[in-house]
Image: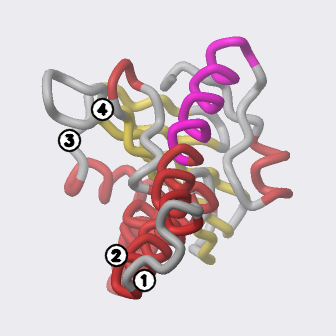
Amino acid sequence: MFDAVVNVDKSIQRKRLVYKVTVGTFLDYFFTYFLGSAVIILCLGPNFTDKNPTPPIILIIISCAVALWMIANLILLNGLVKFKGKDLNTNRKDINSVLNTYYDSNTVITTDRLIRSVKSTKGFSFGNIVSIILDDEMVYLNITTLGKDDMPSPFSGLYNYVRCRGIAKIIKSHQNQID
């Protein structure tokens, strides 16, 4: 999964990571969304069957909460957190500093406008990909959690979105300290 090519211009335009479509990325995301949809159906399905015409209200509330959480995860899976930084070189330097401090990664892939920090899955631990798109003073950030066989996990979208916002605050405060 981490070798997928990000289309930077389309990602900025759509405000979410857009990958070059290959058989591998298609299958990874097909199974990710299939698993997420299955969780939603399993949560909501038993509440609306003829065998159980009036399920307990607490079961309905819990099922709907899990389904909404899963929908939010799927929507935010590739969402980008956007924030305004300084200039391109300052942003790149500060981002590399924050990545080295907070993220232990095996691989850092850097191009002109894209920085990706990749930590593959090992044994029972999850991996992650921190993707950062630089566009002059604007910075776009995404974290994707990797599950088995480095496939994107459909269960961490909301958590990763909150983590991205936290990293954006750290980078901005780091840049404000320098001023």
Residue 8, quarter of picture: top right
Q: Quadrant of residue 15?
A: bottom right
Q: Which stretch is magenta? A: 22-36
Between the residue at mark 2 and the residue at mark 4, the CA separation in whole angstroms equals: 21 Å
**Residue linked to disc 1:** 61
Q: Nearer the viewer, mark 3 or mark 1?
A: 1
Q: Identify the residue at the far left of this view.
A: 124
Q: In the image, what residue type sits under mark 4? A: Lys
Which of pointers 1 and 4 lies earlier in the amino acid sequence?
1
Instruction: Give coordinates of residue 172: x percent, y percent.
Output: 44, 79
User: Which of pointers 1 and 2 indicates the residue nearer the eye?
Assistant: 1
The residue labelled by disc 4 is 119
Compute the Cα span from label 1 to label 4: 36 Å
In magenta segment, residue 35: yes
Is label 2 or label 4 in front? 4
Question: At 58% across and 73% down in the image, what residue appears?
Answer: 86
**Circle 2 sits on which residue?**
170
Nearer-N-terminus badge (3/2): 3
Pointer 2 and pointer 4: residues touching (CB < 8 Å)? no
* Amino acid at the residue labelled 1: Ile
C-beta proximity under 8 Å, tags 4 and 3: yes
* Dot placed on the residue nearer the N-terminal end, 1 or 2: 1
The picture quadrant where one finds residue 79 is bottom right
Counting from the top left corner in percent of width and height, residue 41 is at 56, 52
CB atoms of marks 3 and 2 within 8 Å: no
Distance from Cα at disc 1 to Cα at disc 2: 36 Å
The local secondary structure at tag 1 comes to helix
- Counting other residues with Cα less than 10 Å from the Cα at mark 2, is it few (<14), some (14-19), or many (20 or more)? some
Q: Which residue is mark 3?
A: 104
Q: In the image, 14: left or right of 33?
A: right
Query: Distance of mark 4 from mark 3, alpha carbons?
Result: 7 Å
Amino acid residing under circle 3: Asp
